[in-house]
Image (tube, rainbow, N blue to C red):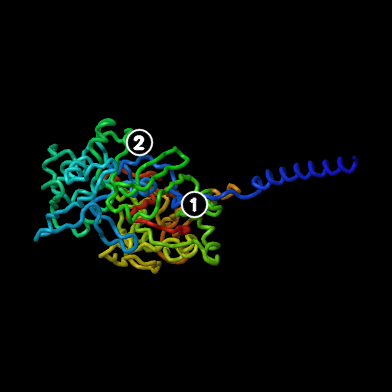
Amino acid sequence: MHHNAASMFQKTAGTILGILIAVALPACSRGESNVEAGNRDGILHYGNGAEPQSLDPHVISGSPEVTITSTLFEGLVTTNPYSLEIEPGVAQRWEFSDDRRVITFYLNPRARWSNGDPVTAEDFVWSFERALTPALGNPLAYTLFPIVNAQEYADGTITDPDAIGVKALDERTFEVTLNNPTPYFLSILAGYTAFPVHRPTLEAHGRVTDRFTPWTRPGNMVNNGPFTLQEWKMNRRLTVVKSETYWDAENVKLNAVVFHPTENEISEERMFRVGQLHYTDRVPLNKIPTYRTMKNSPYRQAPLLGSYYLLFNILQPPGNDARVRQALAQAIDRDTLVATILQGSESPGVALTPPGIPGYQPPDIIEYDLRPRESCWLRPAIPTPGLAGAGIHLQLQRQQPPDRRGRTTNVEGRSQHRRDSGQPGVEGLPRYLKRREFPGDPRGLDRGLSGPRDFSGEIYYRRRHQPRRLLRRAL
């Protein structure tokens, strides 16, 4: 009796213990990560920086928006992701007139919108006209100005869109007439400003010149790219799935891409480390040395065809003196700044146009030089009270996001002149320069920039192509 009772107790205790172990194991084990699930299901998890402001290709200008819209839309041509050479997009082929001013594009008969409608030459005519419409306020309308009457229409000088040099010769033949031969024009057509949009869809959801209407929402959007918009949960994720109507769908290997918005680059890098992201191009500078020393490191350095530059008000002292500007250009040791503070993640800039643009190599016109010479002698050149004979001190700061302890790092460059050295240079005027992304038209910036009244300047960044420093895992 006692033995049986004991046996029953042992069986009961064993059963309870087994249940506890069975319950505890899943609770302690690590769940499947996004990367693991994505590798299995063909879904790419992409760290995309900030929340996109819009998905309208004729409104956007920021990197987060451009990355997403490039999966949703396709222009007449595309660029090879490795060489940046021009390749066919919606257009199967194209030909130039003898004077190189007229380009005729022959559209792929298999090109379809995501609702099954054919992509036609008239779609491109209407989309180009919309992109240039003054009421829309397209920040990159100026990129289409090589087209006949494009600038005049965008400026409101003419109001007839039929005067713009774009024409549908038939359903699948699109013609563009340029003001002059423009060797880089095909590269412009690979950009998002030249993406077509589906006219019936825009007209069904408001005025076509409204910058923000529901046509870009899931369930409403009709697009012609390799993916379609499935969901957009603000500040959580945006998901695009493979399009079954895309003309080259058989060569699209991914089933979906999930874009994760993260405002803080430290958080995004942490998401990569724990397997929530396949890819991020936001790598904190202080993490780069560690990644470089790792075996089989996921860190890759690829060129970002863009330029950081200082923009000064040249209509007032001291920026209106060419000798001051020349001294500033020569007094910044770009090589040391890049090698140390920026951890080799950038390249020294020697011209506004970065190296790597197909068919063009910028000249090396700037060199670090603090030797005394007349063209750079600043002290007589600065009529600013209190600075005569002292030169200018320029301090550049770019604040990095806070680390896990709340500390921030200022990426700082100094260019200065010691009064007893006899060296020309710049000293004496501290200035905090903010960074702005500036992909648009620089006209109108001569109205004055923020900063001290007599010495205004800001750090601007002009983007050409992607990518940049990045962390990635292959699917």
Gap in Å between the C-alphas at discs 2 and 1?
A: 26 Å
Residue 455 visible from this viewpoint: no
Residue 417 vs residue 256, the one in the foreground: 256
**Local SS, label 2:** loop
From the viewer's perspective, is residue 369 above or below residue 79?
below
| Residue that sits furthest to the left in the current view | 98
Query: Residue 382 appears in which quarter of the rendering?
Result: bottom left
Nearer to us: label 2 or label 1: 2
Residue 219 badge: 2
Image position, residue 98 (x, y; %): 9, 61
Residue 123 image point, x, y percent: 20, 43
Which residue is drawn at the image coordinates 73% and 45% (left, top)?
18
Is 215 on the left or on the right of 257, as rendered? Answer: left
Residue, disc 1: 277
Q: Residues within 10 Å of mark 1 (few under 14, many from 20)?
A: many
Query: Which mark is drawn over residue 337?
Result: none
Whether residue 33 is visible, yes or no, is: yes
The residue located at (49%, 51%) in the rendering is 277
- Rendered-image quadrant of the N terminus: top right
Q: Looking at the image, which is closer to me, 178 or 320?
A: 178
Q: Is residue 452 left or right of residue 94?
A: right
Point out the tag, 2 or 1, that comes first from the N-terminus: 2
User: How far across and how far down the image is residue 320, in percent?
Assistant: 30, 52
Q: Amino acid at mark 2?
A: Gly
Q: Amino acid at mark 1?
A: Leu
Q: Is residue 121 left or right of residue 216?
A: left
Foreground residue, 196 or 186?
196
Tell me the crowding category of disc 2: few under 14, some 14 to 19, or many 20 or more residues within 10 angstroms, Cα based.
few
